[in-house]
Amino acid sequence: MKKVIAIAALSIVGFASKAQVSSTATQTVNLNLSNAIELTFTGNNSATGAAVNLAFNTVNDYANGVESAAQQLKVRSNKKFGVTVKTNNPNFSYTGTTTPAPVMPVSGVLGLKVSANGTGGTIATPFSATAYSTLSSTAANLISNGLNGGNQTFSVMYEATPGFTYPAGTYTVDVVYTATQI
């Protein structure tokens, strides 16, 4: 007996759906920004700059004054800003052997000029890039309308002209810079 194997061809035709199946999820991300400003000296990336020593060694130093090297500061701010400058005391403090201690005023002795300005703002009067203006213990505008950014730099130079009135010793004052958003 012969076996007959019948093969039946069965064709299944699948019907693809034209609509795609999907699902979505949404999440809100909020950036909660605060106003931020920072002022540092680029030489040491600190808010306290290195000491500037102006040595008076010759008669010409006393007659003509002594000038410092440029001191660069950097402002990082997310808004426009201004910078003021003042000294922490109207007089220099004295360290030396003279008694009583001499009193040297800052005003008329210590001057400042802005030797470079990369803030996008303007140098405020009475300061300039070409001439020294005296400092005092009253805050004075130094930079006006500085632009926001992460690397807004400016450089200052000091000049001291104490004349021949004061005896040998070390005369010290802190110069205070303040950056304020506007």
Image (spheres, rainbow, N blue to C red):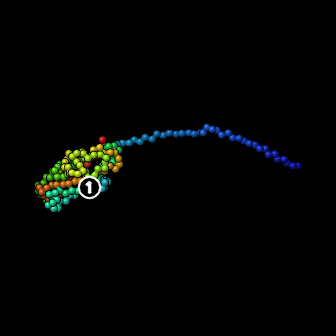
Q: Amino acid at mark 1?
A: Ala
Residue 157's quadrant in the figure? bottom left
Q: Is residue 29 left or right of residue 130?
A: right
SS label for mark 1:
loop
Can you name the residue that lies furthest to the bottom here?
58
Instruction: Estimate the x, y position of residue 12 in percent, counting from the top left.
Output: 72, 41
Residue at 33 percent of width and 43 percent of height: 79
Residue at 78 percent of width and 44 percent of height: 8
Residue 158's quadrant in the figure? bottom left
Whether residue 28 is situated above or below residue 171 in the rendered picture:
above
Residue 29's quadrant in the figure? top left
Instruction: Estimate the x, y position of residue 93 in percent, counting from the top left.
Output: 17, 53
Q: Is residue 130 left or right of residue 167?
A: right
Residue at 35 percent of width and 47 percent of height: 149
Can you name the residue that lies furthest to the right here?
1
Q: Nearer the viewer, residue 112 or 137?
A: 112
Residue at 32 percent of width and 45 percent of height: 147
Can residue 145 be seen?
Answer: yes
Instruction: Estimate the x, y position of residue 110 in percent, counting from the top left.
Output: 19, 52
Can residue 94 be seen?
Answer: no
- Residue underneath mark 1: 70
Q: Nearer the viewer, residue 178 or 157?
A: 157
Whether residue 176 is situated above or below residue 167 in the rendered picture:
above
Q: Is residue 172 left or right of residue 73?
A: left
Q: Nearer the viewer, residue 125 or 12?
A: 125
Instruction: Estimate the x, y position of residue 10 in percent, counting from the top left.
Output: 75, 43
Q: Is residue 30 left or right of residue 110?
A: right
